[in-house]
Image (spheres, rainbow, N blue to C red):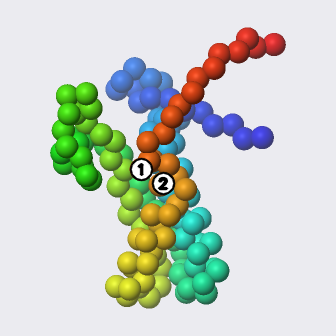
Amino acid sequence: RHRLFADEPQSVGGGDTGPSPYDLISAALGACTSMTLRLYADRKGLPLGRIQVDVSHEKIHARDGVGGGDSPVRPKIDCFTRVISIEGELDDDLAAKIVEIADKCPVHRTLENSSAVRTEVRRAG
């Protein structure tokens, strides 16, 4: 039912006709985070106003990242930075709870865990 187009920026040879694949992953993380927080807040009766999640992506040296040492095989890792903005009252306890719940977002968990990618090729038609 839905169509999404992805492309790379012109600076790397793309046509810039849509978000990059990493932009789409970032959007998925932001959307899943806000949905996870909204479901939790509604279930627990927390007075959270509008939730906005901004996500950026960069490649960083593994030694600068979370829990990593540098290795010649994988000297850089992907780092997604998530900034959650909440309208309404927000004390330190609620902010800590928001981080805890955000870290339970399924896309967050997928990105943090090692994943396997299986590829199959099928003849169309």
Provide the secondary structure element on which disc 2 rests: helix
Indicate the position of residue 64 as horizontal and vertical percent values.
Answer: 19, 48
Outermost right residue: 125
Q: Is residue 96 above or below residue 123?
A: below
How many C-alpha atoms fall within 10 Å of the one at disc 2: few (<14), some, or many (≥20)?
Answer: few
Indicate the position of residue 7 as horizontal and vertical percent values.
Answer: 50, 29
Which quarter of the figure is the N terminus placed in? top right
**Cβ atoms at labels 1 and 2 below 8 Å apart:** yes
How many marks on residues?
Answer: 2
Q: Is residue 50 above or below residue 125?
A: below
- Residue 21: which numbered mark, if any? none
Residue placed under numbered mark 1 in the picture: 112
Indicate the position of residue 25 as horizontal and vertical percent values.
Answer: 49, 44
Q: CA distance from mark 1 to mark 2?
A: 5 Å
Provide the secondary structure element on which disc 1 rests: helix
State the residue in front, 102 or 3.
Answer: 102
Residue 71: quadrant of the picture? top left
Q: Residue at x 47, y 66 (%)?
A: 102
Q: Residue at x 53, y 81 (%)?
A: 48
Residue placed under numbered mark 2 in the picture: 109
